[in-house]
Each structure stands twice: as C-alpha cells, then as structure tokens.
Image (spheres, rainbow, N blue to C red):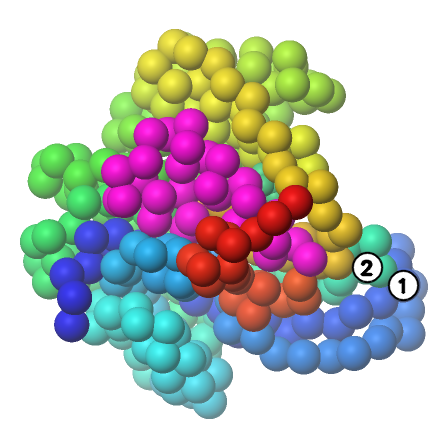
Amino acid sequence: MRESRIIVVGSLNMDMVVQADRIPNPGETVLGGTFFMSTGGKGANQAVAAARLGGNAAMIGKIGRDIFGSRYLQAIQEEGIDIQGIEQDSEEPSGIALVIVERSGENAIVVAPGANAGLRPEDVEQQFHRYPEGKILLLQLEIPMETVVFAAQQAKKRGMLVLLNPAPANDAVTSLFPLIDIITPNLHEAEQMTGVKITDIASAKCAAQYLSAKGVRHVVITLGELGAVLLDDGEFHHVPVPRVTALDTTAAGDVFNGALAAAIIQEKSLVDATAFACKAAAIAVTRLGAQSSIPYLHEVMQYQE
Ligand code: ADP
C-alpha cells in the first residue's frame, strides 16, 4: 500500500437518486424518471476524487454493518483508498441520502446520517496513528462537530495542512477558524458564514475578505458556473471554469475539494490547484451521480474546452 498523504475524516452515505422534471413542492408528489443507487457522502466523495486525481487518500469514518455498508466498502477500496480507518457499526444503519435531480441539473437532498453521527473523537484518535505520513487533512461537516474539531486539532499538532469544506452549512463552524489553513465554502455557505449577499465576483471577494479577517489564511469560494474566487495570503484571484452543459451538479463541490487536495499534494500553487479543481468539477457536472461522475486524472489532463 502506498503512503496515504491525504487523510479524509468524514461521511459515507449510500445515495438513492431519482431524476425528475422538477423538485416537488411540500405535499406534492411528482412522477420521476430513472432511479439508481450510488456511493456518496461528502467525505467519501472527496476521498474518491482525491484518489482518482492523483492523491493517495485514506479515509476515517463509520458505516453500518448492513448491506449498504459491505457493498460500499468494497466499492471504495477498489478506488485504491486505504479503508482501514473505516469502522462498520453494528448498532446504527449506514448513512443514506435521498437525492432528487432536476432536468436542469439542480438537486434537492435529504441525508439520514446513521452511523456517520456516531463517529467520535475517540475513533479519530484511534485511527489517526495509522497515517503518520499524512500531509493534508480534508474535512467536511457531515459528522459531529466535536469530531471535526478534534481531527483538526490533531492535524495541527502534527503540522498537517487542514482543508475544510464547510458543507453542509453549520453556524458552529466559526469555532474552527483558528485551526483551518484553507476553507472552501460554496456561495450559500459563504453567505451564511459572512452575512454578505453574493451576487457576483466582487461580492464574493467581500465575503472572502470577511473570512480572511476572521483568521483563515486561504479562502476559496466556489461559485458554480462562475468558477471560484480565491484569497491567497491577501491576494485575490478569480479562477474561471470551462463552459459545459450541466447535467447533474451533485457532488460538484466534493470533486472540487478532492481535486484541490490532490493538486496541493502534488505541490501546485493554490491558484493552479484551484484551476485544476475547477476543471475537474466542471467535467463532473456533465455526468450523473456523485462518485460515478468523478473524472480520472488523465481525463482532466486531456480535457479541451
Ligand atoms: P456545490 O456543489 O458545493 O454547490 P458549486 O456549485 O460552487 O459548489 O460548484 C463547485 C465547482 O463545480 C465550481 O467551482 C465549478 O468548478 C464546478 N461547477 C459547478 N457548477 C458548474 C457549471 N454549471 N458549469 C461548470 N462548472 C460547474
């Protein structure tokens, strides 16, 4: 097994996906199209993206000891991810996400966290020692906040780079700021964290400035088809994204984050890493599903606009 230099502490969910003309209103039933199941969860999606895009990844997390859990572990191991740190929980079911994808590519998702909610700081402590070679810790907010904080503290003690994708939005995230090297909110998360209404590149820069003033060294705000705005040691950059026809934007942010970690571990500058991540995520939105949509390194390298 190669050394795992990207450690992801996060969630694993089995996604149940239905395509529909539109997302139903409350109380309404809409007849959908195709149904499929796919491995998902922000943590695992980002681990798979990192692994496919040239980063050696290990994952620490919890999944149920049920049909979904066993099937899931096999799939993610086939990606070349070190799964020794994923525990199968006998008490709780695997995390599940119910996903509706509109024809426009827009989606609506409900997550039942199941075993993910039982990932404790003690579990992270127990598993972390497996990876003394870890260089980047990649975090999201689909596991308990105290576990996220603990993992970030451990990583800082070891001199690792801490990359936080603050998704889904959580008001308690500000307590983490002093531990974070790079934060990567999307537009909605950035608005919620800063109170700045983001309507264009200029307002995204204001939000990035706000987060930077709170003590986060590098801020990357993803803006869908507008790409990303980056505040890197006081300098702003706007990184555009290739123009594509979006089919399903599920996991675009996850692909972005896994790709960003993989590019940083390959010693790209943050601006170049962001451009690489934008390209990888743009390819992903042209395909259906979460992990099924994640491109491989050669696809990103060969991609022509
Ligand atoms: P999230 O998936 O978390 O909502 P975004 O919508 O900001 O995050 O998307 C993350 C990244 O995915 C963007 O920075 C961009 O690189 C890519 N992306 C998302 N939507 C599109 C789109 N319609 N066209 C091209 N790229 C996209």
Residue 265 lies in the magenta stretch = yes
Residue behind mark 2: 102
Residue behind mark 1: 21
Magenta span: predominant SS is helix
Q: Position of residue 99 (x, y in %)?
A: 68, 65
* CA–CA distance in space, label 2 to label 1: 5 Å
Q: Tag 2's secondary structure? A: strand
Residue 284 lies in the magenta stretch = yes
Q: Nearer the viewer, residue 251 or 294?
A: 294
Taking the spot 33% from the left edge, 77% from the top edge, the residue there is 77
Q: Position of residue 68 (x, y in %)?
A: 48, 83
Taking the spot 66% from the left edge, 63% from the top edge, the residue there is 287
Point out the stretch of residues depicted in magenta: 258-286
Q: Position of residue 276 (x, y in %)?
A: 47, 41
Above or below for 13 versus 221: below
How crowded is the residue under tag 2: few (<14 C-alpha within 10 Å), some, or many (20+)?
A: many
Q: Nearer the viewer, residue 130 or 25?
A: 130
| Residue 174 in view of the camera | no
Dot 1 amino acid type: Asp
Q: Quadrant of residue 63?
A: bottom left
On-image quarter of the C terminus: top right
| Residue 151 in view of the camera | yes
In this view, which residue lies farthest toward the bottom?
67
Asked whether disc 2 touches disc 1, contact meaning CB atoms under 8 Å apart, the reply is yes
Q: Nearer the viewer, residue 6 or 180?
A: 6
